[in-house]
Amino acid sequence: MQDMEFTIERGKLFMLQTRNGKRTAQAALKIAVDLVHEGMLTKEEAILKVEPKQLDSLLHPNFEAKALKDAKPIAKGLPASPGAATGKIYFTADDAAKAFGNGEKQIILVRLETSPEDIEGMHVSQGILTARGGMTSHAAVVARGMGRCCVAGCGDVKISEENKTFTDKAGKVYKEGDWFSLDGSTGNVYSGQLPTTAPEMTGDFGTFMSWADELRTLKVRTNADTPADAAQAYQFGAEGIGLCRTEHMFFDSDRIKSMREMIVARTEVQRRKALGKLLPMQREDFEGLFREMKDFPVTIRYLDPPLHEFLPQDDEEIQALAKEMDMTFEDLKALVVSLHEFNPMLGHRGCRLAVSYPEIAEMQTRAVIEAAINVNKKGMNVTPEIMIPLVGDVKEFKYVKDIVVKTADEVIKKAGVKLEYKVGTMIEIPRAAITADEIAAEADFFSFGTNDLTQMAFGFSRDDAGRFLEDYYEKKIYEFDPFAKLDQSGVGRLVQMAADLGRKVRPDIKLGICGEHGGDPASVEFCHKAGLNYVSCSPFRVPIARLAAAQAAVKAK
């Protein structure tokens, strides 16, 4: 379809220029499918006619066109997670959860920045707005995983969580309960309630995606932490879970207490007692994931964040928790201070937690294996994949792997069943990529955690980079955000190096990517060229990755 410009001068027609016409995703799909049916295009040619990112608009609600045209934005941030959302604003996750419990169904969570503790409030919200953070901040990543609209890094406004107010750049103040509307596809923020339209999944969409699946060789998995996320991803065509972040399972109100009991425990016996309470919860979660994935592989990452993230930081909350935990305020405050880390991204987290507290890895292994045994007894054929995070040395990996294998084999033997399982690692530290041949001698698979690998390779935080990256784009130092699109010449070399080294030692090693780059078309094409087996991305980006993988296969031919 062409968009042509012309002029008529003194009776003569002059053609000025022509270019490919802009079209909606629905139109692009219909044109591509019709042209194949009419014999004008092959399936391979048609697959290249649709931009993968266009599919986003088919998977999320949008604002009604007329209402959007008449509305004026009061602020603008980063379009961190697509879609449209309208609702009443709340400034804490607890307030959002309480409002939902009281029957409020349209909620916008407004925060300076989100943390894992905000999961419950994010879950009940239609949209999330943060003043800080970039395209791969906690708010952005979790919102994309949940399919929630998100505008992040809205720095031209003032958010007072203490006073529960929002002040726009014109100085107008908004309070809790006021209506806001967010456009996660443009980053625009509107005051008031804008009407939305539900996404339409046409027959052409299904036909087109079936062609993509015929052509691609790269598998597409999802990053999912709950059965609901897994079910959504499966509906969108995911072929397994490439990343289950187990820490997200601990933040629900009925679980956080047991997690905190484990953290404040002074002895191993006390710690094991608290972990015993978490075991059935984890097992139930894993069973749900296995069931939703219908025998497709499920990769479960063990506990990753530093422990201080599970504890409150202000004195009022510490006081309340101390009473709940039967501790003095002074003792709990001292513990919170002692767990503070100067650089949590480089601190006591990932596999280092399992080295210090092996009983955590034991509990999680028991939960994974018992869950697999339970669902297999009901006719499934699950082979769980256990992923040990943040490994930088093969001896580190081997220490934790030995705990996993010993515990898993004991559970399997006691159950009197046969069960295969895999133990692999996340390659997210540059040293792991450089020594991948050593690690491959022990690991069944590699999953590239490109969020952290990018962060450590560049030497700046993905949450703080938004403060200066615009200057880098303007001055032509960087062309794009390396956290949104894989830096192929730097981070990509680390991925390729690790893949090549791993295959030399273990030719059948399974290789995947589970960072946010797994849903970026250009990064997916790189993964195809690098010979990876699969990419894993947020549920709502699965169709985008499927199409990008097909286009990579067609271009490679």
Image: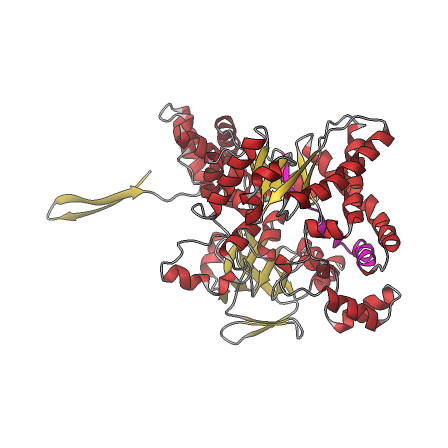
| Residue projecting furthest to the top | 39
User: Could you tell me residue 243's position as x and y percent?
Assistant: 64, 42
Q: Is residue 349 left or right of residue 282?
A: left
- Magenta span includes 257: yes
- The quadrant in which the N terminus is found is top left
User: Could you tell me residue 324's position as x and y percent?
Assistant: 86, 64
Q: Which residue is more in the foreground, 403 or 83? A: 403
Res 477 quadrant in image? bottom left
Whether residue 76 is visible = no
Q: Is residue 489 above or below residue 530?
A: below
At x 70%, y 44%, the residue is: 226
| Residue projecting furthest to the left | 10
User: Could you tell me residue 150's position as x and y percent?
Assistant: 57, 56
At x 10%, y 48%, the residue is: 10
- What span is in magenta? 240-263
Whether residue 273 is visible = yes
Q: Is residue 233 left or right of residue 401?
A: left
